[in-house]
Image: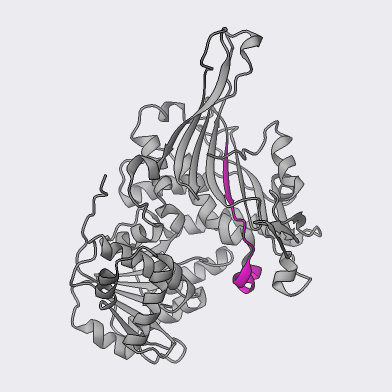
Amino acid sequence: MVARVIEVEAFDLVVFGASGDLAHRKLMPALYHRFEDGQIPDEARILCTSRRDFSNEAYRDWAKAAIAEHVPSHDKERLATFLEKLSYIAIDVGSGAGFGDLAKVLKGRPDVVRAFYLAVGPDLFGPICEQLGKGGMVNEHTRVVIEKPIGKDGKSAKALNDTVGAVFKEHQIFRIDHYLGKETVQNLMALRFANALFEPLWNAAHIDHVQITVAESLGVGGRAGYYDTAGAMRDMVQNHILQLLCLVAMEPPESMDADSVRDEKLKVLKALAPIKGEDADRFTVRGQYRAGASAGGAVPGYLEELGHQDSTTETFVALKAEIANWRWAGVPFYLRTGKRLAQRVSEIVVQFRPIPHSIFSAEAGSISANRLIIRLQPDEGVQMKVMIKDPGPGGMRLREVPLDMSFAEAFKVRNPDAYERLIMDVIRGNQTLFMRRDEVDAAWSWIDPILTAWASSKEPPRGYTAGTWGPSASIALVERDGRTWAEDGL
């Protein structure tokens, strides 16, 4: 099966921070893949900027190395053609040097879609946007892409959005969350709203609870400096995990129109039951990894990686969230994320309620409640756990088996990286998979009281050994409700 490629119109894409880690690992490989698949038109230009003093040739060599590392199966001739699309302009955001050069390059194509991708720290969002506005580089065909973190709390997020919003209109601002670009995340919407099977059961009458896990086996590594100012709550929960929760819990939108989808996500965020003060002790767990073993070798603890011993930044979070509306009343959503956990896995587990009555004898065996498992990474796919009769003579014996769909096996095509899809959506002007400002505000309104409760607590994050599933308190969070974390995966 060949994936259908939908061409986009000609565009100018300007990448700020084009010599950084994000450009190296994600943006350049993603753009090359889209070019290789024939989606980038001949008239498109990719303008790369950073403070480094590159010539066009030197930057193309840098980009070539990045693509060779992350796309080992690339076609050398296609890569050479792609690299010709790249041009480089040195820009110093602090002094403003180089913005005039950029304006001259863009001036000749005012009617072409113009997208500015800010692959830089959030402290540079405002200064870059101000310079773009002063330089006359913003018109009705312009878009701007900003990466997380969008603020450290509600107040700073508002200030950041005000600064960007002073130059760009809301429909021109694309707040990117790469999790929403993953194939399986979008398939969650297809499963719910393109099939008659699930939606009638998608409520408190039939679903016992939902688990969302985003686990990483690696530590903070080179991100230690940033991570210590953020922690797992700001880095993962406020954006990625709450967005996944919204897609699981939202009502059917009127259509796939961007605002229809985002209106329903916003309702979920506003319906989250607040966790304040002492409730934070009951419904949240925060942890910090200690030295242990990962991938067969000894690894240091977070404080050792950080280089000092007085940090109380959490590297693990588990929460019990509840949505106060008719569909989900009484259904807990267990959320967890962390560094240096037992394995790298991101998945959503929808646990259905047990059957009300068994007609089978005790000899048939126990009956497990059905589970829908949606795996985001590393192997994207969907699995439904169901009960069947164990084959063979000798009476009725029940057995749980998976109905399995691996996307790699089902479609026999390369699964595009999330950034490939999201960059093309920016060019198209499709904001469905991007966060609207009121979503950001509503997410912080729920997160801020938890952070405040943690800040006022005298209890430090609970230690857990690297290579495990986090603090024992996170197990207790679920098991005191008579449930358990699902760790069997796909």
Quadrant of the image occupied by residue 188: top left
Residue 312, horizontal then vertical, whole percent: 74, 65
* Residue drawn at 32 percent across, 49 percent down: 413
The magenta stretch spans residue 26:
no
Residue 461, horizontal then vertical, whole percent: 75, 58
Q: Which residues are magenta?
A: 210-229
* Residue drawn at 22 percent across, 72 percent down: 44
**In the image, 236: left or right of 285?**
left
Q: Is residue 5 above or below residue 24?
A: above
Q: Is residue 13 visible?
A: yes
The magenta stretch spans residue 218:
yes
Q: Is residue 250 above or below residue 73?
A: above
Q: Nearer the viewer, residue 274 or 60?
A: 60
Residue 392, horizontal then vertical, whole percent: 52, 13
* Residue drawn at 52 percent across, 36 percent down: 325
**In the image, 103: left or right of 163?**
left
* Residue drawn at 33 percent across, 43 percent down: 411
Q: Nearer the viewer, residue 198 or 389?
A: 389
Residue 450, horizontal then vertical, whole percent: 66, 55
Quadrant of the image occupied by residue 427: bottom left
Furthest-right residue in this view: 458
**In the image, 473: left or right of 148?**
right
User: Quadrant location of the N terminus?
Assistant: top left
Count the labels in the image.
Answer: 0
The colour style of the image is one colour
Q: Is residue 355 visible?
A: no
Q: Nearer the viewer, residue 337 or 430?
A: 337
